[in-house]
Image: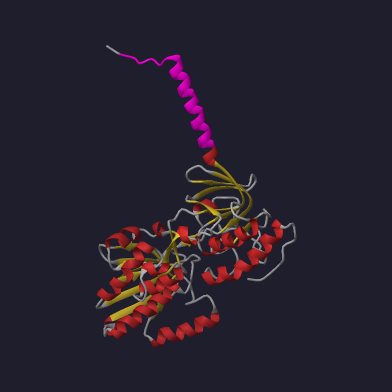
Amino acid sequence: MNSQKICSPGCINFISQISRSFSKSCAKESQKKCRLLVIGGGTGGCSTAAKFVRKLGAGNVTLIEPSDTHYYQPMWTLVGGGIKSLDDSSRSMKSVIPSGCEWIKDKAVKFDPINNTVTTAHGTNVQYEYLVVAMGLQLNYGHVTGLLEALERDPAVVSNYWDKSLVKTFPALQKLQSGNAIFTFPNTPIKCAGAPQKIMYLADDFWRKNGRRENINISFNTALGVIFGVKKYAERLSEIVKKRNIGVNFNLNLIEVKPDSKEAIFAVTNSDKGETKSVKYDFLHVTPPMSSPDALRESTLVDQAGYLNVNKETLQHVEYKNIFGIGDCTNVPTSKTAAAVAAQAGILRTNLGAVIDGKPVQSLVC
């Protein structure tokens, strides 16, 4: 026998009131407004928020950042080299976001510059008067076949660009007694283009001091045709690798890692025949391919390469004049480093401040 429970009219009325109240509460939570919205809690985002909280006052600046921890990533080379610990490079995100700035602990997933709105992963729509995009770069480990599996399974495969792998680097250096040590550089723009070589030189020094260097063959396999993008430094680095007996192999882009057979597969970038090269490794430090974050790259805010399309002399978006950018996610032709962010910060403060005050922007040079 089927049974049914029937609510009384009073019960139905009570439920309707609760439902309407809940709906209003949800609507309130999913809609926010601010004068300035900053996307990203890295160096560029936090410094921008701090400056404009002072200018606009508490409650007028909102920052969207999903992470609980803020890392000073320039220190990560030293962590990988056993000189610093990961904890030395970290602070709680809460501690670095300026007082008076509202923190939305979520991820920006959609940009609507026509309606001055950003949507988060949890469905919050944030409407802004001014927007600063400081999202940094996305690490695309999954673009290299087998790499994520290798980073998880093989203690000899490491990467200083990811905190979970970074802590493996120095133990792997300590363990290696002999064999092939390979350091890679991808075919995309990356943050801190010197970092892939910095850890290589620290490893070379460590193995020399421990009397193992003669038994270890070090190779720098780069997808580029030069050892470094700035000619002045490339010339000096070429002398250094020669003196240290480090092999440099140009036009090799890592496309696959086979942890079971300890093979690294490289595409030959200057070949039009689809050539590949397989190299056995005993230690492999990988710099992953990088890009702007998916949400930004899929928006209307980017150039053809997928980076935030700003005027390089003002940091103002070329189309949407209430939008500015700073750091690695922009198409400004500087290195993607904390030093570049420091240089850009003053330009951003000057020009965003001018727009807020109804004044013209200034053409400045990073």
Question: Looking at the image, is 255 positioned above or below residue 124?
Answer: below
Q: Main secondary structure of the magenta part?
A: helix
Q: Quadrant of the N terminus?
A: top left
Q: Which residues are magenta?
A: 3-27
The residue depicted at 45 percent of the width and 23 percent of the height is 15
Identify the image quadrant of residue 319: bottom right
Does the segment drawn in magenta span residue 180?
Answer: no
Q: Is residue 282 visible?
A: no
Task: Tell which of 107 and 246 is nearer to you.
Answer: 107
What is the total number of numbered labels drawn onto the structure image? 0
Q: Is residue 346 left or right of residue 287?
A: right
Residue 27 coordinates in the image, percent (x, y):
54, 36
Q: Residue furthest top?
A: 1
The residue depicted at 57 percent of the width and 70 percent of the height is 342
Q: Quadrant of the C terminus?
A: bottom right
Residue 324 coordinates in the image, percent (x, y):
63, 58
The residue depicted at 39 percent of the width and 57 percent of the height is 142
Does the segment drawn in magenta span residue 4?
Answer: yes
Task: Tell which of 17 and 228 is nearer to you.
Answer: 17
Identify the image quadrant of residue 55: bottom right
Q: Residue furthest right?
A: 359
Q: Residue furthest bottom?
A: 243
Residue 251 coordinates in the image, percent (x, y):
45, 71
